[in-house]
């Protein structure tokens, strides 16, 4: 590796968030019964004609704007001709010669912690192919995916390591997610990654023989596949063997890349203009209206929240994993001023519940108003932290107000000083020997008595009042 350098380029296929497919009225439903969402247009039946989905063009324009790309207002499509089992009609409608966007970039923080612009060569629209399910020596085909609208985003070969590739993938995912362009779920295939890797002697300008790794479905697998392939190619070169131009896939079980097929050049596809879709001239005003109405991007939100709330970067990154979390956060601030507590609950207890149930926050019964009211009661010490978590769990499951939960579960907060002292006095009387350790281990002694108090009251004592009384009794007895 001392005499070789790595060159990597990325191609992302991103499913567009439309209700119907890009060239047909076929509906889109994830996880539907295989081959139940198939349309004759997408299968290329004789006599069928494609009709371009306007929403797909709109979403592509939004992405072009976010990636600072030059937009081509003249829409032209081409046929990419090849035979493969996942393409029943023998060709794919794409934009080989006239991409809707070109010459853009996306900023990342690179492996050295520096800001870096990743150059994006092109963004074009195309249709998806059928999904292949490999089961040992058999391949099953699900044509539900055939015809779903995609944008393909192609970088220049500017990466030199797996870290920067993963940083770019995270950035492109959150960008299209917050724009509403795509669900961008790698595990469901709505965001897929093809990696092109080559090695060359240090100082050479020409690229080495390129190997493509197709359809990587997680950021972890992207990193593993790149590192494995770099090592594989290095070993081949060091033993005098030739790198073959080929397409490979990553095997989760063996954690190795596996040969799929030899790779031909672009001329093998025999591109020609799509005869059934004439050129379409997009109106300048229509384009401007779309790109000027883009949602806020994650970097804008990060900057605003950091300046306004002084949140930590790790907290912000967790909140920004889903746009609906940000919307819920902002809606909750209409009912409470405790922004840090809102963030804490969203990132901790609420997110744990969502992960366990595989839900988004909009699929729960919790409302921003109820979360705000819960935090206000906690802040006023009308409920304890432990009680708040019990109440929150109930509100996530049922459409119920905090007062209804408190009444139903008979939750109360003990704040009466005399009552708390009466509970603590016997506990201190039974543990006088422990008080001798206080000067050396005050924290341990404090925690013990607080724990016993909470145990006796089932967590219904105000921690602040309870702690104050414990300190008074320690001073009295020790």
Image: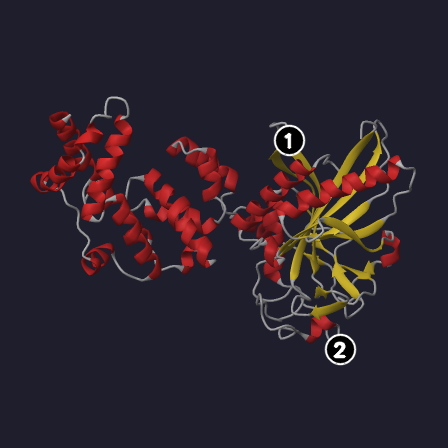
Name the spot of residue 474 as percent of width and height, x first.
16, 28
Local packing at callout 2 (Cα closer than 10 Å; few below 14, some 14-19, many 20+) is few
- Residue placed furthest toward the top: 439
Labelled disc at residue 197: none
* Image vertical order of residue 212 relative to residue 198, above or below: below
Disc 2 target residue: 47
Picture quadrant of residue 340: top left
Look at the numbered disc 1 and give the secondary structure of its residue.
Answer: loop
Name the spot of residue 396 as percent of width and height, x first.
35, 57
Query: What residue do we see at 78% from left, 35% from top?
Result: 6
* Image vertical order of residue 140 relative to residue 380, above or below: below
Towards the viewer: 324 or 17: 324
Q: Earlier in the sequence, mark 1 or mark 2?
A: 2
Name the image quarter holding the C terminus. Answer: top left
Disc 1 target residue: 111
Towards the viewer: 320 or 303: 320
């Amino acid at each position: 590796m001392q005499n070789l350098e790595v060159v990597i380029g990325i191609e992302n296929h991103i499913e567009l968030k439309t209700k119907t497919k890009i060239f047909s009225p076929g509906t889109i439903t994830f996880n539907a019964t295989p081959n139940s969402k198939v349309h004759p247009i997408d299968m290329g039946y004789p006599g069928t004609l494609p009709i371009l989905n306007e929403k797909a063009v709109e979403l592509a324009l939004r992405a072009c704007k976010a990636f600072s790309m030059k937009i081509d207002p003249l829409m032209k499509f081409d046929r990419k001709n090849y035979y493969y089992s996942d393409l029943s009609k023998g060709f794919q409608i794409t934009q080989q010669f006239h991409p809707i966007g070109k010459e853009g970039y996306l900023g990342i923080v690179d492996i050295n912690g520096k800001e870096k612009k990743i150059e994006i060569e092109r963004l074009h629209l195309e249709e998806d192919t059928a999904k292949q399910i490999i089961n040992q020596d058999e391949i099953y085909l699900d044509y539900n995916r055939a015809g779903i609208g995609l944008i393909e985003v192609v970088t220049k070969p500017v990466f030199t390591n797996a870290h920067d590739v993963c940083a770019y993938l995270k950035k492109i995912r959150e960008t299209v997610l917050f724009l509403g362009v795509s669900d961008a779920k790698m595990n469901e295939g709505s965001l897929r990654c093809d990696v092109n890797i080559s090695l060359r002697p240090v100082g050479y300008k020409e690229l080495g023989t390129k190997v493509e790794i197709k359809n990587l479905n997680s950021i972890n697998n992207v990193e593993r596949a790149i590192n494995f392939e770099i090592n594989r190619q290095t070993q081949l070169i060091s033993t005098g063997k030739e790198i073959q131009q080929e397409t490979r896939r990553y095997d989760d079980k063996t954690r190795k890349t596996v040969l799929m097929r030899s790779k031909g050049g672009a001329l093998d596809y025999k591109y020609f203009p799509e005869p059934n879709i004439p050129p379409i001239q997009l109106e300048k005003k229509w384009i401007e209206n779309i790109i000027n109405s883009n949602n806020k991007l994650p970097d804008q939100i990060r900057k605003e929240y950091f300046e306004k709330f002084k949140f930590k970067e790790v907290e912000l990154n967790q909140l920004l994993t889903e746009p609906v979390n940000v919307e819920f956060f902002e809606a909750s601030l209409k009912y409470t001023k405790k922004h840090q507590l809102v963030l804490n609950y969203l990132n901790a207890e609420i997110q744990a519940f969502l992960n366990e149930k595989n839900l988004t926050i909009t699929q729960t019964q919790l409302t921003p108003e109820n979360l705000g009211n819960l935090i206000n009661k906690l802040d006023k010490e009308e409920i304890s932290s432990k009680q708040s978590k019990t109440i929150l769990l109930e509100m996530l499951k049922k459409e119920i107000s905090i007062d209804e939960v408190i009444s139903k579960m008979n939750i109360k907060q003990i704040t009466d000083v005399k009552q708390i002292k009466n509970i603590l006095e016997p506990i201190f009387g039974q543990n006088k020997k422990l008080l001798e350790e206080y000067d050396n281990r005050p924290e341990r002694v404090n925690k013990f008595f607080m724990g016993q108090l909470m145990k006796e009251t089932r967590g219904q004592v105000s921690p602040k009042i309870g702690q104050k009384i414990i300190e008074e009794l320690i001073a009295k007895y020790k």
